[in-house]
Amino acid sequence: MRRTILLMILVTLFFSLNRVNADFNFWVESTEIFTIGSPSTFMVYVENLEPGVDNYVISYDVNYEYPAGNDLSHIIDTRLQTNRIEDVQTNQIKDTQGTVIILAQVYPPGGTIVFTARSDGGVEKSDLIQVSGGPSGGIPKTLPEFSIIGFLQLIFLVVLVVSYSFHFG
């Protein structure tokens, strides 16, 4: 009987000391307003709910198919500052930042970026960002190279070329 009780205590102690940190919160926050060529930032958060310290690896998968079935995921450029969030203490929230740049127009229904956080214990949680171009389909309202200064430079260049061709032509 004593051996059984001692064995149960040792087994319980072993499993309690080797417990894997598995409970955490994970979420992604974004403005979800995207314009072609303009970086949009997002934040990835992890909160450790278990006693002890845990580390997390962040991965993502971009999905966007044109209605005809063509995979156009490459036009949603996604980058993270770092794919690891390390040394997260109990009840502590840590984050990393990333950017999304749309390289071409995104048509409805849009695309998704699915983020997955994996703890050192092997537990995974996911969240996503819905990527759409908004009412304009992501078309930029103005092109930065055609600001008023750029437009004046263009006119000056045309006048210079025309006057040069008349003067030497």
Image: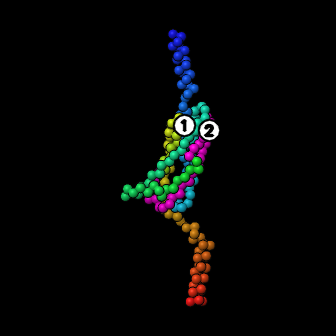
Q: Quadrant of the C terminus?
A: bottom right
Q: Report the span colored magenta.
A: 83-112
- Horizontal arrangement in the rendering, residue 18 relative to residue 74 (left or right): right
View extreme (top): residue: 1
Position of residue 112 relative to residue 38, above or below, is: above
**Can residue 24 be found in the magenta stretch?**
no
Q: Is residue 110 visible?
A: no
In the image, which disc is placed on residue 87? 2
- Image coordinates of residue 78 in percent, x first then y, are 52, 53
Q: Residues within 10 Å of mark 1 (few under 14, many from 20)?
A: some
In the image, which disc is placed on residue 166? none
The colour scheme applied to this rendered structure is rainbow
In the image, which disc is placed on residue 120? 1
Label 1: state its secondary structure.
Answer: loop
Q: Residue at x 58, y 67 (%)?
A: 144
Number of numbered markers: 2
